[in-house]
Image (cartoon, grey):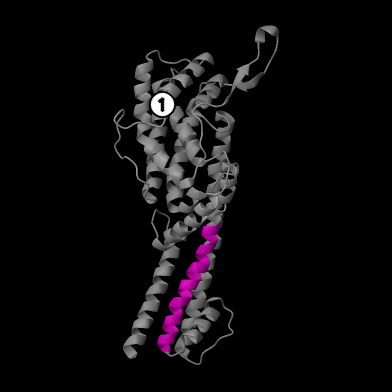
Amino acid sequence: MIVLRISAFIMGFCLIFVTFMSATRTFVLPRSSPVILTNLIFKWMRKFFNGIVSIMPSYEQRDGIMALYAPLCLLIMVPTWLFLTALGYMLMYWALGIAPLWDAFLFSGSSILTLGFATSELQVATILAFTEATVGLILVAMLISYLPTMYTEFSQRETAVSLLQVRAGMPPSAPELIWRLQRLNQAGAFDTLWLDWEHWFTRLDESHTSLPALVFFRSPQSQNSWLNSSVTVLDAAAFCLSVADISDSPNPALVIRAGIEALRRIADYFKVPYNPDPTFPEVPIQISRTEFDEACDRLLSQGVPLKEDRDLAWQNFAGWRVNYDSVVVGLADLTMAPDIPWLAEYTFVPADTDSGQTGGSLQKA
């Protein structure tokens, strides 16, 4: 019996330690650190949500349901940790002589929730109850302090996503982004974009691996997505390097490098498979040559200067795109991101200045 009680005390202590370290690594540790317990919560909840969205007929309805996924997972974490901690203390109380197990559970629950309706004459049990109440308060405080940090990162991420919508349309597309920036006719428009998004990708890398729940936080508008915005900027950078005859700035290459590193680290955290060293044409990309040519023709008609060798331009573009193509596909499946067209459905047609008109209109492409 003594051996059984000692074993129960050790098991209870180990359960408490593992639970507390899971919370610490999830909420406090400022680096990428996969946590088994946290991952299990997200996996089980994802299966539940997948069952619901599978019967939804439209993407907007599925997006509305999935918007609750990450917040509910976060809210479920604390009750889960409190319950496991209470179970661990229950085993320790039972080992100290509080029996039967139900009485030990009541004493544990009363202590961790600081209700105080259950007491014990054992001094050791009372001291242990004080530690349990402290642990319970720390777990709750972790979540309370964690949420403002997470929503600050979310707000900064979505600010850039919304600003991109102004420049790249809704939903965003790389050719539309290039044309609108070119139409501004400002020398620093592109360089400012590349610099801003290089910083954005660097911050995305840090925040979405140290705060992995952010990956599943969806944009306020169903057609917006941090992943789709990332792809739009990366495609635009690849297009400028390979096709658009705009400037010889190295900044687009830096943006692509930063984006690839960020997306791959996020994929590594969630164990999303991708090809780490792809080459084109051995590894195909999601964009076809026909779509590429249509984008080039559209931009030419809109006055964007392009390089003459279309075949070489296609090879160069695909050579850039293949490095992040499979990562994007895997992350899109993970996050249930909306589909975006390579070409915007509408394009801006300037007014006829010869007739004295100003402005323009949106017309079907």
What is the magenta range? 72-96
The relative height of residue 247 versus residue 62 in the rendered view (above or below) is above
Quadrant of the image containing the N terminus: bottom left
Quadrant of the image containing the C terminus: top right
Q: Residue 9, percent across and down?
A: 38, 82
Instruction: Please say whether residue 28 is visible from this viewpoint.
Output: no
Q: Pick the residue in front: 46 or 221.
A: 46
Q: Specify the farthest residue to the bottom.
A: 121
Residue drawn at point x = 39 percent, y = 61 percent: 36
Q: Residue 144, percent across and down?
A: 56, 62
Q: Quadrant of the rendered structure where residue 274 is?
A: top left
Instruction: Please say whether residue 321 is visible from this viewpoint.
Output: yes
The relative height of residue 293 versus residue 115 in the rendered view (above or below) is above
Residue drawn at point x = 49 percent, y = 82 percent: 105
Q: Quadrant of the rendered structure where residue 313 is?
A: top left
Q: Pick the residue in front: 337 or 259.
A: 337
- Per the image, the residue denoted by label 1 is 288
The relative height of residue 67 versus residue 163 in the rendered view (above or below) is below
Residue drawn at point x = 54 percent, y = 24 percent: 181
Please check the rendered image and state whether residue 137 is part of the magenta-colored stretch, yes or no.
Answer: no
Please check the rendered image and state whether residue 89 is part of the magenta-colored stretch, yes or no.
Answer: yes
Q: Residue 275, percent across and down?
A: 32, 40
* Dominant secondary-structure state across the stretch colored magenta: helix
Q: Pick the residue in front: 65 or 320.
A: 65
Q: Amino acid at mark 1?
A: Ser
